[in-house]
Amino acid sequence: MDKFGEGKESLQLRYFDKEENKFNNIDKDISDNLINLIDSLNEKNRIVYRGFSKKFVNYDFWKWIFTVGEKGSHFRGEVLGVGSEDKLNYFSNHSVTAEDNYKNLLNNMKNDIFPKYKYKNLINGIDTLEERIEKFRIDNKRDYTEMYYILLSWLHNIGHINECPEYKKDSPFISTSTSLDIALSFNDKDSCPKYAFVVILSDSNISDYFYTKRLNELLKGFNIKWHKDKNKEVMFKDAIFPHLIIGILEKKSDETNFIINPGLRTLLKSKIPNSFKENFLIKSGIPINQKDFDDGLNALKYNSYVEQMATERIICKDSKNFPVGTIKKSS
């Protein structure tokens, strides 16, 4: 089952009832609309998947995940023991310019990270890396912020966290895959059941993502032949907002359940024509009621969050916040 909807005959479509703390089956008219919708989105290459560990799944998870959304482990920071007192999310110094952050990171990659990298043979001429990347930036008229995020995405793609732990732990990116089978393979080994988010690639600014295959194309411009995109990866920056989560697949040994986002269930129950619903989802995502967002944030043990405004995005932690740019324009 490489895409959601394949093997429909064994798929159980359900929703979680917060009040009764149980799963109920979806009405047939809604389930038919849902399958048709996802089939259409799949045909348009608008669906990706993110596998996750069953250790996060409990009552609070089901109660709040469709209100809060999915964020990387660094948003739990102190809870998981990987936080840094002077870092909110990214490892840049927010008191200096984008140019300084870009140049400092590039220098660190050249002199510290890549010389120790297991597959450094992929990087031709590490000693001239700074000059080649800076030439690319100038020739292609890329600004410093954009180049900084490209470097961040490269580090996220470097492989196992042990390859550069101080950066991987603080990465702003969340990996997804266009393949459901690949996404499920990133669960705990021999885990049962297995879980995966089913996510829509929306045109909205809440959907900030970057294809690894595009990263590889950019790296060719640096004269670097990088790893093949075997995981069919799409990297989301900062968060997968609940407005983008169609639902969650739960794959057991004898059955597969799909738990629909309650906001999408409400939309599908409406009398609006299906074609309009699909266009709305692609343009704006799923309408979500977030009035109890803070309660959900605490319940899921996040100590920071992302706020998307009309023209900017902000990372918030405690009483601090800072604006961040987009990776999507780099594509």
Image (cartoon, grey):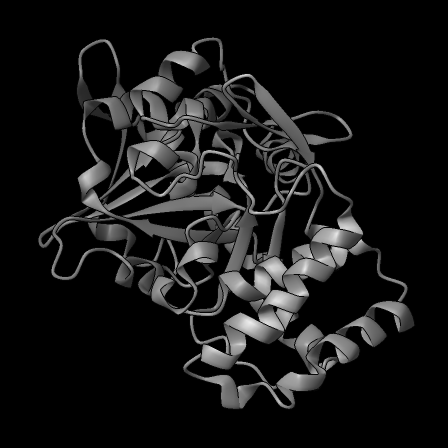
Q: Is residue 213 visible?
A: no
Residue 319's x, y, as percent?
A: 55, 16
The one of 293 and 109 positioned closer to us in this rendering: 109
Q: Residue at x 69, y 82 (%)?
A: 220
Q: Position of residue 307 (x, y in %)?
A: 60, 25
Question: Depth check: 305 or 190 in front?
Answer: 305
At a point 65% along the width and 90% down the height, the residue shown is 125
Task: Tell which residue pokes out farthest to the left in this image.
Answer: 254
Q: Quadrant of the N terminus?
A: bottom left
Counting the numbered discs, the total is: 0
47 or 33, nearer to the observer = 47
> Would residue 287 be found to the left or right of residue 52 on screen?
right
Residue 150 placement: quadrant? bottom right
Q: Is residue 187 visible?
A: yes
Q: Position of residue 170 (x, y in %)?
A: 47, 48
Which quarter of the rendered picture does the C terminus lie within?
bottom right
Residue 232 image offset from top left, x and y in percent: 48, 68
Q: Is residue 315 above or below residue 72?
A: above
Query: At 29% from the left edge and 52% from the top edge, which residue is drawn?
Result: 8
